[in-house]
Amino acid sequence: MAEAPADPTPLTPSETTGSASQGGTQLTVSRGLADWLRRHRTSFAFSSYQTGQLFLVGLLANGTVSFNQQNFVRAMGLCYQPGRLYLGALSQVWRLENMLRPGERANTQFDMAFVPRNAQTVGDVDIHEVGTDAEGRVIFVNTKYSCLATLDLVHSFRPIWKPPFISRLAPEDRCHLNGVAFAEGRPRYVTAVSRSDIVTGWRERRHEGGVLIEVDTGRIVTDRLSMPHSPRVHAGSVYVLDSGRGEIAQVDLDTGERRTVAFCPGFLRGLSIHDGFALVTVSKPRNGAFTGLALDDALRARDAEPWCGVLVVDLASGDIVEWLKLEGAISELFDVVAMPEVVCPMAIGPQSAEMRSTITFDAMSA
């Protein structure tokens, strides 16, 4: 087995924070992030479609936070399974596999080394979130065609569900379908910015009218959200990012009533729940589609500026307990996923020199 050649960038805690510079971006972490990762036995990955990058965050042997970064054009939705990471990108769904055997370490630090092993080409359908069902079938949000879809060996994709208000599949991004929640091995809820059935009709419905939809029945659970994203089922409840308001919300599935869990200083996309904590990505609102929302007023009321980064939120109290902040070249993120029981992960980029020279094989099969 070839040793993985990439080295981690350490983020060393100081009196208040830790910081490092990577690719024109300044990274700062809260003083307690390293301890939180250790206590909750997890690492995490997050993506930036703006700069086309996958980021992996974990702990080095000396207890400092590590940061590993690889390039994937328009990196979007993430799905983690033990030893495997799926990533939706510009025109492909990537499958990355951990090349390490039990007990092995890459470069003496990494206990998981993800290598791209498959890229299923689906075309530029504006892939958003990605997940897998009980049979291991990859299911992704096909935003351009307003549907949930799976991979097909012959065609670009195979549509498996569309909202009942979408009259036909067309490359028109009619409602901006963007998020999917899985439970009991199947997709259960999705989010869309509106119920529009015309080309980019959602853009006129950004302030309110965002919907949470039950997949099995097509029922609109609520239509009182603002640019919702990333529904998640946790402990029998459904959480959603009410992004236009900058809030994590809990939705009552019977009445559709929403309860604010926490306000976050930025445009929210990407939610992963681990040990009763929400990991969320926040972005600086982009001019155009993401300005003029209630989020702007909420930030002004708090005399605050929007962040770009990852926040760790206690779902019980709504407190932001830890964080990672990016400043500089990167101002927008998309998805985040916790990786329980992984201490220090890394990945190899598909176009990197390391990809060409990292060769592994199973000697037992020879």
Image: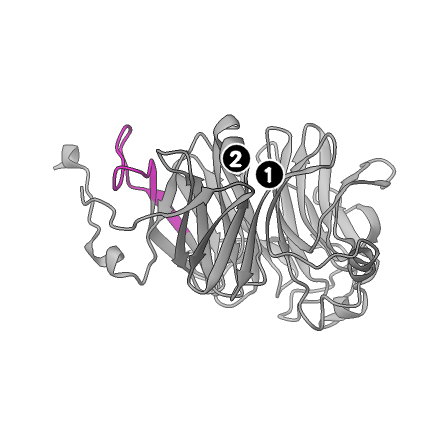
Q: Which residues are magenta?
A: 95-113
Relative horizontal placement of residue 232, taking residue 43 as reference (left or right):
right
Would residue 196 be seen by someone viewing this image from the given angle? yes
* Residue at 45% over, 65% down: 24
Task: Tell which of 323 and 340 is nearer to you.
Answer: 323
Gap in angstroms between the C-alphas marked 2 and 1 = 6 Å
Element type at mark 1? strand
In the image, residue 366 sits, relative to residue 156, either above or below, namely: above
Other-residue count near label 2 (Cα within 10 Å), few / some / many at <14 / 14–19 / ≥20: few
- Percent from the top left, x then y, of residue 18? 49, 46
Task: Tell which of 249 and 205 is nearer to you.
Answer: 249
Residue type, mark 2 in image: Ala
Q: Are marks 2 and 1 in contact (CB under 8 Å)?
A: yes
User: Hey, which quadrant is residue 253 in on the image?
Assistant: top right
Query: What residue is shown with label 2?
Result: 134
- Percent from the top left, x then y, of residue 23? 42, 63
Looking at the rendering, in which quadrant would you find the C terminus? top left
Residue type, mark 1 in image: Arg
Query: What residue is shown with label 1?
Result: 186
Relative horizontal placement of residue 364, taking residue 29 as reference (left or right):
left
